[in-house]
Image (cartoon, rainbow, N blue to C red):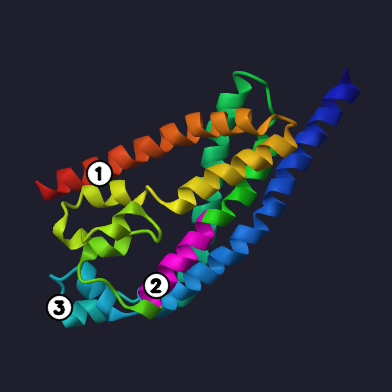
Amino acid sequence: MNDNFEFETKSKNNDFLKGMLFFLIPGALSIVAGYINGKYVIGSSDYYRLLLPQLTEEQLSQMQQPLLLACIAPVFTQLFYAFVYALVLFIGYYLTTKQKFGTIFKCASLAQTVFVVMYIVHNSVLGFGGLPECAAGLSVFPLSLASFFDVCKLDMWMVPTLSYVNVFEIAYMALLAFLLSKNIKQEYKQSLKMVLYTYGLMLLLIVVCTSAGYVFMSE
């Protein structure tokens, strides 16, 4: 009995450690995304001038964020996202097939690479292509539904709703379902269905809460 418990504990720990190891890929890319953001986007006073037009030039000069912090912060942010969604997905699987959290975390960590690539593209567009005409344009993700609209003419609450409908969200769900199907020996359709149920619901809540926050702030 004790031997079995020890084996299961080691197995769970190994899966979690593998998850942290797999996170090295999106983690390293997060530093790249943070560097581009810190050096070429938020490192510019034009960014804060667009975001906070009420500030004076003296106040704008004090808004500069240390480049090291800009590089490191996205790593912890992406790790947090991977952990939270792995937990949500784990609950969904635990109620049905009793999967281990470490295995799911491993898949979620690697799949997070999709979003990090999205932020690299997003920050590169802002940093090298120029800032948008209005603050709403800062939150428009690349290859999203929002990119087909003039967001400066839309109500602020509509921007995140349209922005979250993008190619990267679809790619993330497809990749995560694929990784799950390979790691837990499940058919791809079943894994995709679980991802759509859990992540889809979580994404819907994020969109509703974000949009509601913009509506509340605008009143």
Q: Which residue is mark 2?
A: 125
Of label 3 and label 1, which has the lower sequence position? Answer: 3
Above or below residue 76? Residue 5 is above
Residue 139 shown left or right of residue 190 in the figure: left
SS of the residue at dot 1?
Answer: helix
Instruction: Please identify the dominant SS of the magenta region.
Output: helix
**Is 170 covered by the magenta stretch?**
no
Mark 2 or 3: the one toward you: 2
Of label 1 and label 2, which has the lower sequence position? Answer: 2
Of label 2 and label 3, which has the lower sequence position? Answer: 3
SS of the residue at dot 2?
Answer: helix
Mark 1 or 2: the one toward you: 2
User: Where does the image place residue 159, in percent across and percent down from the top left?
Assistant: 25, 52
**Mark-to-mark CA distance, 3 and 1:** 29 Å
User: Where does the image place residue 55, in percent across and percent down from the top left?
Assistant: 16, 73
Where, by quadrant of the figure, is residue 151 drawn? Answer: bottom left
Looking at numbered disc 1 in the image, what kind of residue is underneath it?
Ser
**In the image, farthest residue toward the right:** 3
Count of numbered circles in the view: 3
Query: Which region is colored magenta?
Result: 115-127
Q: Which residue is mark 3?
A: 56
Mark 1 Cα within 10 Å, few/some/many (few <14, many 20+)?
some
User: Where does the image place residue 81, in percent across and percent down from the top left?
Assistant: 50, 47
Q: Which residue is mark 1?
A: 211
Where, by quadrant of the figure, is residue 132 drawn? Answer: bottom left
